[in-house]
Image (cartoon, rainbow, N blue to C red):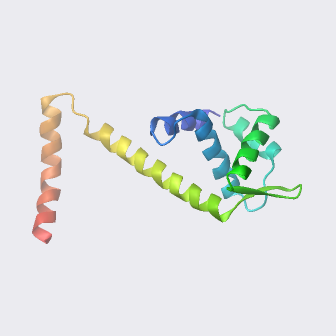
């Protein structure tokens, strides 16, 4: 249940999003994008709740109206919303930014050195791969 709640926190730590509202907007767009059919506020509310994020239907509806006004989603009569082409492009761009930021954060954690012996180990592990790269050139 805490998976996306943790994801919300992890997404904020990437530095890609300025506010938690931006994260929720991204998560909703991603949920809509994954669906093969239009998605409504009630379904999205339930998906968020299953993930540990508790918003009312009205709040989710306001997020959806915001996505509509930005041209990222469009309402399909009373069936729900789908992503527009602009919404798909935005989602792909932001998802790429998130992936790069998460990779950067993970590599930064891996390179964190607290002791001299850790630095020596890191250098010894990296040296052969760099030699191979130079030899291939």
Any part of residue 46 in sight: no
Residue at the farthest front position: 69
Q: Nearer the viewer, residue 71 or 136?
A: 71
Residue at the farthest bottom position: 137
- Number of labels in the image equals 0
- Quick check: 72 above or below 13? below
Instruction: Using residue 135 as the reference point, say whether residue 22 is left or right of it.
Output: right
Instruction: Please tell me which residue is depicted at 80% across the width and 44% down the height of the picture.
Output: 41
- Quick check: 126 above or below 46? below
Q: Nearer the viewer, residue 137 or 132?
A: 137
Q: Residue 119's image quarter?
A: top left
Instruction: Using residue 56 as the reference point, say whether residue 27 is left or right of it.
Output: left
* Quadrant of the drawing holding the C terminus: bottom left
Instruction: Please tell me which residue is depicted at 78% across the width and 53% down the height of the picture.
Output: 39
Instruction: Using residue 77 as the reference point, say whether residue 62 is left or right of it.
Output: left
- Quick check: 75 above or below 1? below
* Quadrant of the drawing holding the N terminus: top right
Instruction: Please tell me which residue is depicted at 79% across the width and 33% down the height of the picture.
Output: 56
Q: Residue 23's image quarter?
A: top right
The percent coordinates of residue 61 (x first, y second) are 79, 41
The percent coordinates of residue 22 (x first, y second) are 59, 40
The percent coordinates of residue 65 (x first, y second) are 76, 46
Any part of residue 93 in sight: yes
Residue at the farthest top position: 115
The percent coordinates of residue 128 (x first, y second) are 13, 56
- Quick check: 42 above or below 76? above
Q: Residue 2's image quarter?
A: top right
Instruction: Using residue 10 as the reference point, say whether residue 134 is left or right of it.
Output: left
């Amino acid at each position: 249940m805490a998976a996306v709640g943790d994801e919300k926190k992890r997404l904020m730590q990437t530095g890609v999003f300025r506010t938690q509202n931006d994260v929720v907007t991204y998560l909703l767009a991603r949920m809509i994008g994954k669906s093969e059919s239009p998605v409504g506020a009630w379904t999205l509310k339930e998906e968020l709740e299953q993930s540990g994020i508790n918003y009312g239907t009205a709040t989710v509806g306001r997020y959806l109206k915001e996505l509509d006004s930005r041209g990222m989603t469009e309402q399909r009569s009373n069936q729900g919303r789908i992503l527009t082409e602009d919404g798909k492009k935005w989602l792909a761009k932001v998802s790429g930014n998130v992936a790069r930021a998460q990779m950067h954060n993970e590599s930064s954690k891996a390179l964190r050195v607290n002791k001299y012996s850790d630095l020596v180990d890191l250098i010894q592990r990296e040296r052969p791969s760099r030699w191979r790269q130079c030899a291939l050139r």
